[in-house]
Amino acid sequence: MRHKVLRVLVLVFLLLSALLTGCAKHAPLDYGVFLGINGEEIDKLKGFSLVVIEPTEFQADQIETLHDAGTKVYGYLNIGAIEEYRPYFERFGNLTLDVYENWEDERWVDVSSPEWQDFIVNELGKQALELGMDGFFLDNADVYYHYQSEEVFQGLVAILKGLKTFGLPLILNGGDFFVTRCLEEGIAARLFDGVNQETVFTSIDFEHHTYGKQEPTETDYFKEYLAKVKAANLSVFLLEYAASPAVLKQIEAYCRHNGFLWYNAKGLELR
């Protein structure tokens, strides 16, 4: 009798181990976005297959350490806006536009300017490349949504074409309005390699600094949009914020079904 019980316990243990192994295989350690940390906090990046960081906060030897651990590192570039704390803010003050909603220390920038395009590609891009980045995470192509002119669209195209010459993957963060036009015109795959979409399943209350569940209509919109991105053979990443256990299950099931990578950040600080 005791042997039978022991065999049952062993089977239960093996079953639980298999289940845990299966969960670990799909855990969000595949991907992480850590724009709020610096090289002194490199330990936070352990165990991730792909991370996004702020290049100016890391040194080349630290990037090499991550590579030695099997981690790919993508560098963040803000191509459509500029923050006041950037050392080059005054340099491009004449190109700044409206204040970025919910980010009072940030301005949209005129991406149609050849000066800005050259700066993104030949200064910021090259600096990140020299650090040893494996790809670029490009933010604020949404500038085209706010300033819907042909000049702005072509400005973004010029920046992407310039960065493409480095031979590294380009991931656009957001920018669904811009991406959709690129998909419709059949040029998306020539300009970038994937899309990271924030808040597909979660929402942000900027006024109260809280997080919640996304409205169903918004989730449905993003799902339809990301299906088109996937159909164009582009990679898809999700960045969610403080998702509840129930929402995490939805995100996991959706991403597993579609082959997407995702990260559940604790908050906007991305630490």
Image (spheres, rainbow, N blue to C red):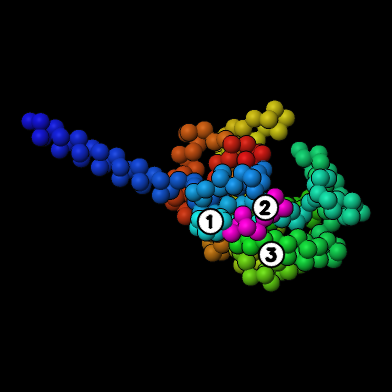
Q: Which residues, given as a range, are shown in magenta?
A: 55-64
Residue visible at 64% across and 45% down?
A: 40
Disc assigned to residue 58: 2
In the rendered image, the residue lying farthest to the left is: 1
Q: CA distance from mark 3 to mark 2?
A: 12 Å
Are the residues flagged by discs 1 and 3 in contact, CB closer than 8 Å? no
Residue 179 vertical placement versus 239 (above, below): below
In the image, residue 115 lies at what x, y percent?
Answer: 86, 64
Magenta span main SS: helix
Instruction: Tell me the amino acid under the disc marked 3.
Output: Glu
* Res 220 seen here: no
Precedes in sequence: disc 1 or disc 3: 1
Q: Quadrant of the N terminus?
A: top left
Q: Amino acid at mark 1?
A: Thr
On the rendered structure, is 207 left or right of 254? right
**Horizontally, is 152 left or right of 202 in the view?**
right
Which element type, helix, strand or loop, lies under badge 3?
helix
Image mark for residue 130: 3
Question: How many C-alpha atoms fall within 10 Å of the one at disc 3: few (<14), some, or many (≥20)?
Answer: few
